[in-house]
Amino acid sequence: MDRVKIGEIFDEQPLWKVFLGVPLIYMPLIFSIPFVAISVFFVKSHLRLMGADNIRPYWDFVPEWASHRYKYSNQIIYSTGAKWHNLRHYRWYWIFNCKLYCPLSVALFRYVAYLTKIVENWWCPFEHDKKNEYEEGAIDKSYWHLHEQEKARLNPDDRDNPIWNEGNDENGNNSVL
């Protein structure tokens, strides 16, 4: 996979672009995270109303606090010498970003993706070239596997896929993910 190129080019960026770009990091915090949190509530409620059980909690997606390498006393700081515009000089800035904002927001987006994969596997157990990426949201059986008549109409790849049909592999053999 090709890597995104940013480190090689960053030092060449004019300071005005950096000043303009850095605050944009916080726009998801202000705009999208509240809506994603509400979406988590609705999607999880939907799954519960459909009878879903054993849904992983949000905190399974958040890194353990102890796994963070730095504490306030040894948190790295970076300073250009101009403190009036350089929040990077302050340890609280790094603690907020590295211990709160980044892990909690990334976990929230991973969690909503996990819940959405469960919904997708429940309502739409139809194979496509990216469906193997939905394995994180594997379920015991899909909506379409509940009735033998509907199950019989499914393509064998859809009927026997272990992502949404616990107990069968792609060949119809009994297995578990």
Image (cartoon, helix red, strand yellow):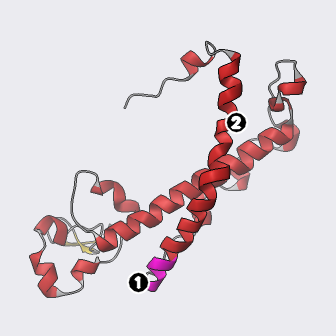
Residue 50 - label:
1
Q: Amino acid at mark 2?
A: Pro
Q: Residue at x 65, y 39 (%)?
A: 25
Q: Main secondary structure of the magenta part?
A: helix
Q: Amino acid at mark 1?
A: Met
Please state the horizontal and vertical placement of residue 145, each as a whole percent of the image: 22, 80
Q: Does label 1 or label 2 sit earlier along the sequence?
A: 2
Cα–Cα span, label 1 and label 2: 41 Å
Q: State which quarter of the image contains the N terminus.
A: top left
Residue 5 shown left or right of residue 64 in the figure:
left
Q: Residues within 10 Å of mark 2 (few under 14, many from 20)?
A: few
Instruction: Read off the magenta span.
Output: 45-50
Q: Residue at x 70, y 17 (%)?
A: 15
Q: How many numbered marks are there?
A: 2
Residue carrying label 2: 23
Q: Secondary structure at mark 1?
A: loop
Q: Residue at x 83, y 22 (%)?
A: 79
Q: Residue at x 34, y 66 (%)?
A: 120
Is residue 103 among the parts visible in the rendering?
Answer: no
Q: Residues within 10 Å of mark 1 (few under 14, many from 20)?
A: few
Please state the horizontal and vertical placement of residue 93, each as a whole percent of the image: 81, 39
159 or 18, nearer to the observer: 18
Quadrant in which residue 78 is drawn: top right
Please state the horizontal and vertical placement of residue 126, each as a whole percent of the image: 21, 65
